[in-house]
Amino acid sequence: MTKFGHFLAGLSVLSLAGFADCQIIIGEYFNATFNQQYFHQVSSSTPVTYFYRRTSSESSAVRVTVSSTAASEEDPILVIIKRQRSVLSWQIPLLLEERYRYCTTSRTLCPMSNYEPSEGQSSARNGLFRALNGEEFFVEILTRSNKPIAFSLLTMVYPQFQQTGTNASFKLTTSPAEPQYIQYNMPPVISLSNPVAVRLGISTRTSGWTDRYQTVTTQGAIEVTRNDFNGSFYIVVLVKPHDRDCEDAQNMFALMRYRRRGSHSAVPNQQSRTKTVLITVVGSLAQEGYILATLLPIGLFMLFFVVSLVLLQTSCRGWNTIICGDAANIWLPTKEGTWVMARAFERSVTGRTIPSMWDPTNYKKSHILSMVRRLRPNSGAFNTADQKLTILPDGQAKMETVAEQNESSTDDGPVSVNLTSIVDLVDTYAPTSSNDTLLRMSNFNKISSKKLTQTSSEYSCTLMVVFLFYSLPVFQLVLTHQALLLVTGNEDLCFYNFSCANRVGILSDFNHIISNIGYVLLGILFLVIVRRRAMYTAKLRLKVADIDDYGIPSQLGLFYGMGLALVMEGFMSACYHVCPSYNNFQFDTSFMYLIAGLLILKLYHGRHPDILPRSYVAYMLFAGFIFVALVGVVSKNRIYWIVFSVFHGLTTIAIGLQLFFVGYLELGTTAFLASWKIYRCSRCRCPDVPWSRVILASLITLINLGFVIAGPLLRPWDFATHLLFILQGNLIVYAGFYATMKIINKEEKISRATCLYFLLGTPAWLVGMYYFTHSLSNWEVSAAVSREGNKECFFFNFYDEHDVWHMLSAFGLFFTFMMLLTLDDDLATVSREKISVF
């Protein structure tokens, strides 16, 4: 370049805030050298210009650092970098967000080769770039101050700017005023579909910014494919000047509170906010690994599905009959046609035989007793010794005198029984005194079985309607959030475990979605098993007319509801994991509340068949749970915890009284005064309630009061999880009490099949809960703090601890359902007049 050219390069057009006109000023000019630091002064009359030249062989980046402690907000200096295709400028001191001041700043200039035009651009421009012999650029320092301001300039070649390799690792030192840039070029061994994961290990709070960016405290990870950036991309690390974005200000209420407290006054120099960052680029799972890892849970649950159907010993023709609902053509399983292993599990734990519930002959004796009990007068014993009760093969009862029927009974003909010969036997199984404190199922079962069946069947139908109207907006919302993340690149929107978030298509966290397949498949399997039992019961009803007088009311509609809720939990959990955040956590917990509530309802309804609310009442109650959880999640207020705990305590007292007095005193609003009068007339004596009622009421009251006290004081988890644990705690206590009462009751037995489901379900729950406690992400805190718990995949290099929780909890729920389904099979052939209530 000529001297005249050098002179022109030293001219600057200075236009700063506060100038009324523009000035052309001739300042100092220097031919500068890379990697050499310059110390000069600048004033309004003497701007300084540095000229740098690079040869074409130098393709690395350049880093420009300018520092000035003498510059102030009233008299700043302006740094301008003029390049072939761009101009970059900033001022010193650098004010970020009009509050944070920095006197040392750095900028990175990418190689000009990165700006070369593509093949589609004009040949003239291509020729222009080919004619360039390296690069020339100018660094100009300007100010409006009349007083000279000292500064320093250092322009360094940055050979570490470009990185490559599948396991590249490099350290950076950065600050809010000195962002760091790294260009990573994917090696050819990485195919178009195989991603790499950019992992940041950071000493303190920092933030990354690119087309896809995250706010990070100590660690973060971003998955990038070759298709995203054509095999080459920049890694930009920028330190935030404050901690606000790393604090808990993610929901709108917390953010509004923070802004009301915020101040825009300037703060002292922040030069000490310098951070060290370790960046590692590692190769992720290949496409073949994705396919294998995806098929793993599907194959595992499908194998379990098929094996379970085989163990049920039902042929394809039999399944077709069951699905079609043709009860007349169904063959009930017989003892001879059952495998030895299956017959072994039909015994009790102590080896006692449990009569087959599908054998009609096992209902004969109980059938006769129930007929006598029903036909017997309300008072006194039978006085007609010549009367006979004839039980016909179709289950009908006929009263005759001895003179009217002299034929002998056979196995195929009517069965004639003298009433006087069994009346004492009937009295043995039914309370004969008004002071008998042992309640029986017959005392509670006042509603017809047809009405109970109709009420329970509403649960599955209503649940399907609820799911359809609930799920459609959910699908739309989560897909919108996922699309927003991909369009904006803001990965703070969703709280993934970014260290183990495997992207497939538009789904950023596919592994947490596919791991929910177990809920769906095992829920369908349970529905098939319940359908099989329902059709067998319908066939048995054709052979035993009064089957509703025996055993615990099955009310299979509740079991259908439980199976459907399990399937729906799989879909809703998958929707939540499309973009997990505090906005949509209720999608994941809603059907958890339903499952826990239905389990409690079925377990309690087993011994109290008439206490079954209509489906819309029950679901309205569950909707109340969801609403309470929603308000608790949004507010995050201790006062709300206290108010809820007070309400919870009062409800606990009411439920405790109900459990204690049900069947002995009426606690309804209309009958309370009447019950109180009876209580006073009995000289203030409490009814003689069995000790089991005292234990149950005490256990339920104690565990709920524990939640009442611990909730607002400790707040050990988020409010939605707290509410879920309340339901689960009550379920565990009542289930344990129920099983204990069956064990100590000599007339009842627990089958080996039920124990097997318990033994299979318990480790699934325990190991699953162990992995559930590994908090890999947490939307209760900020996105940056949430990433502190992120961990890498450990199972097939595709699934993390939460994925394993999904799989194990699916098994745990299925075995829990099966345990509840078979818990009272030993009472199937027992008259309800002999079944205790507890």
Image (cartoon, rainbow, N blue to C red):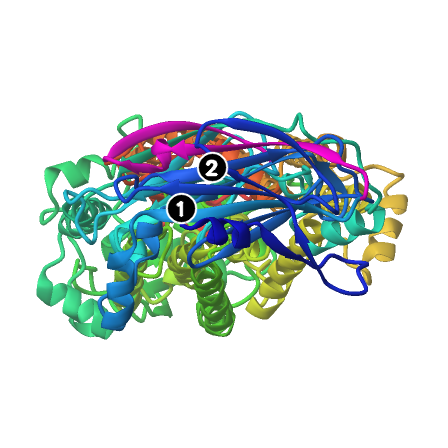
Q: Is residue 597 visible?
A: no
Depth check: give the residue in front, 690 or 668: 668
Q: Secondary structure at mark 2?
A: strand
Q: Position of residue 354 (x, y in %)?
A: 28, 40
Label for residue 268? none
Q: CA distance from mark 2 to mark 1?
A: 9 Å
Q: Position of residue 644 (x, y in %)?
A: 77, 47
Q: Amino acid at mark 1?
A: Cys
Residue 329 sits in which quadrant?
bottom left
Q: The C terminus appears in which quarter of the rendering?
A: top right
Q: Main secondary structure of the magenta part?
A: strand
| Magenta-highlighted residues | 146-175
Label for residue 110? 1
Q: Is residue 151 visible?
A: yes
Q: Position of residue 60 (x, y in %)?
A: 33, 39
Numbered marks: total: 2
Q: Is residue 301 magenta?
A: no
Label for residue 63? 2
The answer to which of marks 2 and 1 sits earlier in the sequence is: 2
